[in-house]
Amino acid sequence: MIVTVTMNPSIDISYPLDTLMLDTVNRTDRVTKTAGGKGLNVTRVIHDLGGDVLATGVLGGFHGAFIAEQLRQAGIKQEFTAIKEETRDSIAILHEGNQTEILEAGPTVSEEEVTLFLEKFRELIQKAAVVTLSGSLAKGFPSNFYQQLIEIAKTQNAKVLLDTSGESLKQVLKGKAKPYLIKPNLEELEGLLGKTFSLQDLSAIKDALLEPIFSGIEWIVVSLGKAGALAKHQESFYRIEIPTIEVVNPVGSGDATIAGFAYALAEGLKTEEQLKLCMATGMANAQERRTGHVDPAKVQTHFAKIAVKKIE
């Protein structure tokens, strides 16, 4: 089973407007409300692929109930820890080709609720082969919380795929227990190392992945956007080239990439197949209007066109 963890979920609300008018009333009848957060995007894509997935994290209030009901209607297994404060909203206003976002900070989780979640996670991890940790931490969780979850997962030999940034990622990289995979994009890699990289000099990116900060991490997949990805698996490096596609909605494609890798691991696919599948799911997500969804037929079409080359 794959367990997906979302520690600061949201209701993602989208307001499409022909024109955003300031300091007056804007009306729309095309509102969409979706169970959001990076981990829930991962969950839905794994579910679309037919994977055995269970969603966990923290949910609170009426918003939390809305998210739980959406997952229930989709037939997705879930075991969340209830918190007292309300789960957040994330608002996107789509106007004149732009996307203006208003993101709530979200709830503050109490020490008691942190402890309750850890107890739940220890139960769930006993059934998990793969665990995904995605996105930010709600207030109240310590900055090393993902490190704690990785340590727990290690006790059951579950493979942890980590997709976060900032202080949460830095804390994990400093810790003794390492995730199985991290997936920084080029900007995040630059932030971690204090360096600037160029797509025209992939050798510099390759050398960067040998830095001591990444020691002990089996997989590092660096997203290069339309240029594909560069990956390091143990001592080997791979260049992944992807075909050009017509993009409908790129939001959540990084989450879909994690989902594809998690599914590939759970299914026991070989190294090059893992890389092809994770990139194919990211591409397929970008072709859907709904965030965190893929058409399995499109995934297979992209899979066949992706080139993976081992480099020295």
Image: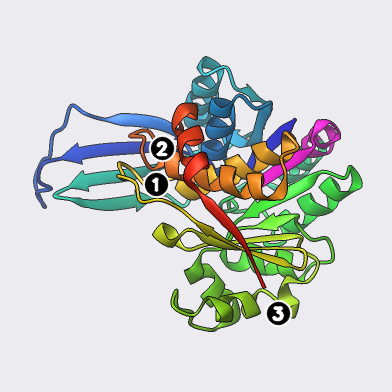
Residue occupying the far right of the picture? 155
Residue 103 vertical position relative to residue 37 in the rendered view, above or below: below
Q: Residues within 10 Å of mark 1 (few under 14, many from 20)?
A: some
Span of residues in magenta:
120-132
- Assess whether mark 2 and mark 3 are in contact (beta carbons under 8 angstroms): no
Q: Is residue 101 left or right of residue 24?
A: right
Going by the numbered disc 2, the residue's amino acid type is Thr
Of callouts 3 and 2, which one flags the residue occurring earlier in the amino acid sequence? 3
Mark 1 secondary-structure assignment: loop
Query: How far apart are the alpha carbons under marks 3 and 1?
Result: 30 Å
Q: Is residue 32 left or right of residue 73?
A: left
Going by the numbered disc 3, the residue's amino acid type is Glu
- Assess whether mark 2 and mark 1 are in contact (beta carbons under 8 angstroms): yes
Residue 60 shows in the view: no
Of callouts 1 and 2, which one flags the residue occurring earlier in the amino acid sequence? 1
| Residue 110 horizontal/vertical position (percent) | 67, 46
Q: Quadrant of the C terminus?
A: bottom right
Query: How far apart are the alpha carbons under marks 1 and 2?
Result: 6 Å
Q: Quadrant of residue 7?
A: top right
Q: Residues within 10 Å of mark 3 (few under 14, many from 20)?
A: few
